[in-house]
Amino acid sequence: MKFQSPQTVDDAIAMLAADTNARVLAGGTDLLVRLRSGHISPSAIVDIKHISGMRDITQEDTPEGSGWRIGAAVSCAEMGEHAGLVAAYPGVVEGAELIGSTQVQGRCTMVGNLCNAGPAGDSVPAMVAAGALIRVAGPNGTRDVPVLDIPVAPGKTSLTEGEFVTSVFLPARPDNASDAYLRFIPRTEMDIAVVGCAVNLTLDAQGTVTAASMSLGAVGPKVKQVDASAIVGSTCDDASLDALAAAATEAATPIDDKRGTIAFRKDVSGVLAKRAAKIAYTRAKGASA
Amino acid sequence: MAKDEFQTREFKVVGTRVPRPDGLDKVTGRARYGADMSAPGMLHGYCLRSPHAHARIVSIDTSAAEAMSGVKAVVTRADFTVTPEDQGTRDILDNVMADKKALYDGHTVAAVAATSRSAGMKALKAIKVEYEVLPHVIDVDEAMKPGAPELHEGRSQESVPEGYSQNVLARSQYGHGDIDAGFAKADVIIERSFTTAATHQGYIEPHACLATMGNDNQGDLFCCTQGHFLVRSTCAEIMGMESGRLRVTSSEIGGGFGGKTTVFLEPVALMLSKKSGKPVKMTMSRDEVLRASGPTASTSIDIKIGATKDGRITGAWGDFRYQSGAFYAMNGALGAMCGFAPYDLENLKTVGWEVVTNRPKAAAYRAPGAPMAAFAVESVMDELASSIGMDPIDFRLMNGAEEGTKSAYGPTYPAIGLKATLEAAKAHPHWSAPLGENQGRGVGCGFWFNFGGNTSVSLMINPDGTVSLSEGNPDIGGSRASMSMMAAEELGIPYRQVRTIIADTASLGENDVTDGSRVTFAVGLATIKAARHAIETMKARAAKTWGIDADAVEWVDGAAQPAGPNAGKFPPLTLKEIAATMSNTGGPISGHHEANAEGAGVSFGTHICDTEVDPETGAVKILRYTVFQDAGKAVHPDYVEGQLQGGAVQGIGWALNEEYVYGEDGTLQNPGFLDYRIPVASDLPMIEPVILEIPNPGHPYGVRGVGETGIVPPLATIANAVSRAADVRMTSLPMSPPKLLAAIKAK
Amino acid sequence: MSRIHVNTTVNGDAVDYLCEAEDTLLDVLRDTLDLTGSKEGCASGDCGACSVLVDGRLVCSCLVLGAEAEGRTVETIEGMAEGDTLHPLQKNFINKAALQCGICTPGILVAAKNLLEKNPDPSEEEVRYWLAGNLCRCTGYDKIIRAVLDTAAEMRGAA
Ligand SMILES: Cc1cc2nc3c(=O)[nH]c(=O)nc-3n(C[C@H](O)[C@H](O)[C@H](O)COP(=O)(O)OP(=O)(O)OC[C@H]3O[C@@H](n4cnc5c(N)ncnc54)[C@H](O)[C@@H]3O)c2cc1C
Ligand code: FES
Ligand code: FES
């Protein structure tokens, strides 16, 4: 196995294109575990952390306002330490910050979480609910794709030869908007989500939800976008939250495994949907105050 | 030793909280654990393990691996040509290297020694094993049924009745009185069935060893173990060598809890070293630890208890079915002995079953067999108390065992501390603190025997007046400090003047394993007696110096003093002064004690726990936890507290989230700390320890072992708390959120 | 296979070593540099026994490649005491019996020191969450958490 650490995006593309059995290394918190257990044996490791821009969090202007670009090698701890990003997308950051321990936080990235393509990645549902765009660089140039287009099946992504992700873009959004992510785990830390749920919503001046999106993790082969119209037009009263919960339970298509049963995951999808919506709603109201 | 001697004694060192002698090494990273030693020219050894739960090994071809660069030795069962005489040791050999069949997922079938990890890994891949996969069985009740896939032939003992599969290896029975008559007198009878999942000790240090063995049949072994003397005898028998030719040195040990009371890698490393002619180091990965070391039994238990309306138990019955993996282990019998041990029962019958399944051979885990039994019995006790409207502590007090009670396993108790722990629990503010919504409080009791056993200790008086103490029991939780304290106490010198080390197998007589909560009791006893032996010699030297009779000398505050008619005639001679002149008064001075210690003194504990249940997800939070345990005499209170806290938290893990999860194919689904969920710091509150001191008449200072009892009550205590918080009786462990939520929804 | 030459700083000293691409920083520390104070409890990021700081950031050294240490600064348990003067956490871990077997202790000390540098006045809950990736099976965490909180108070008092 070779270890390479390119300084530019083009060098990285060239290295990845030259060796189809090469693997991108970001924080390594998935990759190194698989390497040590013998699950993968790549011929080369391409460490993207020294490419300029990969470790930056920047604001980027768009016609809709100012959005956030997060480099592919930004660690989740660095996201949590960035006050501006936390204020703008508390749900995305809390998803990222739930990954692993303090030690894992210092290394792991959202993009690694996404490209690992596990059904239970904690940072993915909030990115989906936020409508984030993933920037992919490759031999044929750069493209921006929706989050859900990256994973195709557990452990498999849509990235083609020589391609890798360079950043995540979180779009600008109005003032009265916020998001939240909750997961269920048996312990308080150090577990993989049994169910994860993110809700992203926008309110009008009266506190009525004008737009909402929801997404569920660990209840299907990949993260699911779920219809959240049940709370649109409401003030997140109990009846509309119950309807949202029912939609989540209905949409969940989990399996029985060592971490949970089908019935449990379906039930808890609804519970988390309700609870996450409430938190996002409170935040959005606070954001407007 | 008269009973009142220790009770009136005023201790100077014992009972204080001194810093431990190995502390500095452990906070600076200098301490050497199993994997921290290396040797020049050392090779690295790796095991090839069965991917099947049950399979006949048709053939093993190691030729390709042997031919690879960097590979220095490959061993299979064919290299182990000696058949140990003892059945237990034959089982250990079959466990460390599969014979004709692989009996569980992870069972070692071959091993290699290579110059690097990568060479070793490649060699493992190059070994070709042809398996014929056989049907397997994982569940204890399934394994007992006639027609179940059978692991062994002709191994069932005579005690097993007709009508069971050959997986049932033994049945044992305990009790007294007439249970039918007892139940006939009951106003209320509750009968329930329980299950508990297998758990693992979860020590953070994986098994590791460094073996050097030559073709002169002499060997050296450095390993993390709870008992290097046992490692020596077991390995010597397996290797077909005399035990005097094998020296075993114990490393610092990174936790054991019973799981390091046998061997796994050691004989394999010795064989690889013998074959390669080089030192071989082996360490297990976490995956290997979970798949192939020694977890606990899983159980299926039925309990029936009857009581009168005013709270007197009239009859009790229990059937304890334990599977202990692929080989015999005594676990069900221990459950049958311990479950009802806290109670004074007129009519009792219990039966214990030992069953084999396609899982790794169970090893001890803190009070082996007892926590599951206590879970079942104490759950029914709780329900009974509720159904007759009695406070659960009062109900236990009314039926609690005390001095003179005939125990559930036969003997009559001497002075014991069960009721003291119950009274202390009842009087503690925790018991009466208010509870909020979805919260519940549970109480549970537990018992463990404690052991004494073979012990050999040497205590040397050094020329400068310091004292060196050699003991033969690996120190897991601060026992070197306790030994130094007891030696200092007895000699009448400051703690700092004594240094205790763990000697290797060539330096002391036989010592049993660090288990059975025996060390502070038995090694402490031997230390005190070794000190007394040295004191006798020092008194004789002083007498010689003074020219008086040895029995006219007393030992007071670290010095010899003339006594009786000579009192005051000579100034006292301190230990230091006697040491300084010892070469002129007869040569070196040391004290020894060797014995098979008896009188360990049984131990009881009572725990209280508050939980909060999330009724929508089944998540359980531990809000408050208090442990009450009788320590006899707490030599070093900090480390006694540590044992109680650690035991309670292991019990919390067992009760809530820890379990061996097997797939349909009989392979372990969660061989890592991510999915084998031991409690993390953020899961827990502080654990309040309350130490009671009801002196053990069998020890000069009244010491009882404290290491194991702490894990016995938690499973029941938490189950009782959760059952009250969720208002549904939980009879299956772990009470993981999916299980609890399903129970809540079904009520 | 040619090995990789790495120049780095470990506990303040310039160090260079050769490693294979798949060697983790933990492998290098333990097997090449003889710094066996960092322990391997899992090699998968779950136990924290291998905790070290890389450029001041707390990480599991089993989840870092040895090659990644090029140009970085690495701090391990061996560098925690200054000469024979123990760090207050080390002193308190001994005096307050915050260890039993001690295998988790190096990782916990490294993690706790990093916490107190970032947050000199953590709450009990903050300490518990910060250390959630450091498994201890012996103590039930009680005395560890107390030792960290007491040390924090002591260090605030001294500052
Ligand atoms: C102890 C522990 C606890 C964990 N807990 C959680 C948890 O709670 N929740 C959770 O979701 N996950 C958890 N994980 C998994 C892991 O930490 C996360 O998935 C993490 O976000 C991965 O990020 P990384 O940067 O470390 O990825 P890496 O390991 O570097 O990479 C992961 C995969 O993505 C690929 N990749 C990385 N970056 C790119 C890129 N820019 N372009 C293309 N491909 C790329 C890699 O080649 C690799 O296949 C845990 C892991 C550990 C060890
Ligand atoms: S060894 Fe690195 S976290 Fe366990
Ligand atoms: S002291 Fe043993 S694991 Fe922490």
Image (tube, coloured by chain):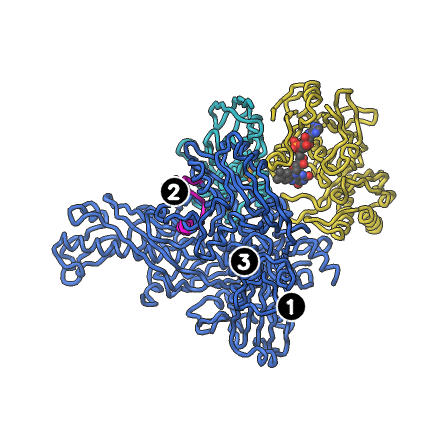
The amino acid on which the numbered mark 3 sits, given as a three-letter code, is Thr
Q: Is residue A80 visible?
A: no
| Residue lying farthest to the right in this orientation | A233
- Find residue B219 and name its label: 2
Q: Which residue is mark 3?
A: B626
A259 relative position to B518: left or right: right
The verdict on a common chain for dots 3 and 1 is: yes
The amino acid on which the numbered mark 1 sits, given as a three-letter code, is Arg
From mark 1 to mark 2, how far is it between C-alphas?
Answer: 53 Å
Q: Chain coloured blue: which letter? A: B
Q: Which residue is mark 1?
A: B192
Mark 2 or 3 closer to N-term?
2
For image coordinates 52% across by 55% down, the residue present is B365
Q: Secondary structure at mark 1?
A: strand
Q: Start and end of the magenta stretch?
A: B210-233
Q: Secondary structure at mark 3?
A: strand
Query: Which mark's residue is nearer the viewer, 1 or 2?
Result: 2
Quadrant where the N terminus of chain A is found in the figure: top right
